[in-house]
Amino acid sequence: MERITIGKWAILVLIVISVFWINQRFNISPEDIRNLIYTAGWLAPVVYIFLYALRPLVLFPASIFSIVAGLAFGVYLGVIFALIGATLSAIVAFVVANRFGEKAVRFHKKGKTEYYRQKFEEKGFLYILMLRLIPVINFDLISYTAGLAKVKLADFVKATIVGIIPGTIVYSLVGASLVDGNIMTVIGTVALFVIVIVISLIWNNKFMRAIEDLKPD
């Protein structure tokens, strides 16, 4: 049993070191990430999804990778690849927290983490869904906390996929607009992004109060 545990930790450490090296080597720039995945040629989507999936191990911003999708593959393919990568990255963070516990998570137990943890254990699917719909809330905070809480993986995945669709589309549009280079396109995309955030924040409290009135799962 001890050897199995040591082996798991060794694999986790190697993965973290590898992703951290990539993070430092390419200096967290959307253009650098795009250029990196382009070097893989026709395997670029696979490399992109792989890097996105490992991203939470070094807490690299998920939003940057979603922007890269539009920057590298255009809006339509970008949305598809970003959804796949974001979902896998959420699962990776969830599993790491679930299997290795709090020692493997870089968030403190106080504040929002403990608050979300309690709420997830009460009404996991609905809370995760609502939080995923708000692009400005830390993506990995939700994933790691859900892994620490008593949340079913299936519920977590379903809530994540549905909840990240609006934000992923907007982030991909932002990336694609940078390629277009048209100032009006960029302004329009940024305006859309702001509108999505404002609307999600306005309605969030109302929906959360409604969820509070529901009986626990």
Image (spheres, rainbow, N blue to C red):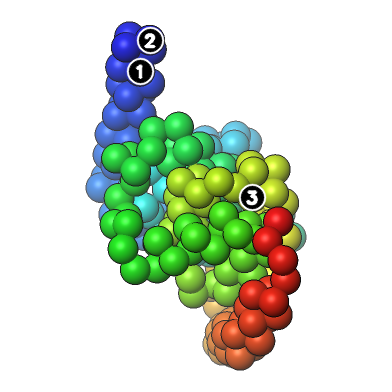
| Position in image of residue 196 (x %, y %) | 63, 83
Q: Is residue 170 left or right of residue 95?
A: right
What crowding class fits label 1: few (fewer than 14 Cα within 10 Å), some (14-19), or many (20 or more)?
few
Q: Is residue 122 left or right of residue 30?
A: right
Residue carrying label 2:
1
Q: Earlier in the sequence, mark 2 or mark 3?
A: 2
**Mark 2 → mark 3, Cα distance in angstroms:** 29 Å
Q: Residue at x 70, y 43 (%)?
A: 154
Q: Secondary structure at mark 1?
A: helix
Q: State the residue in front, 68 or 200.
A: 200
- Answer above or below: position of 137 versus 199: above
| Position in image of residue 81 (x %, y %) | 65, 50
What crowding class fits label 3: few (fewer than 14 Cα within 10 Å), some (14-19), or many (20 or more)?
many
In contact (CB < 8 Å): disc 2 and disc 1? yes
Foreground tag (2 vs 3): 2
User: Is residue 190 at all visible to an observer of this figure?
Assistant: yes
Identify residue type, mark 3.
Phe
User: Is residue 169 at all visible to an observer of this figure?
Assistant: no
| Position in image of residue 190 (x %, y %) | 56, 84
Identify residue type, mark 1.
Thr
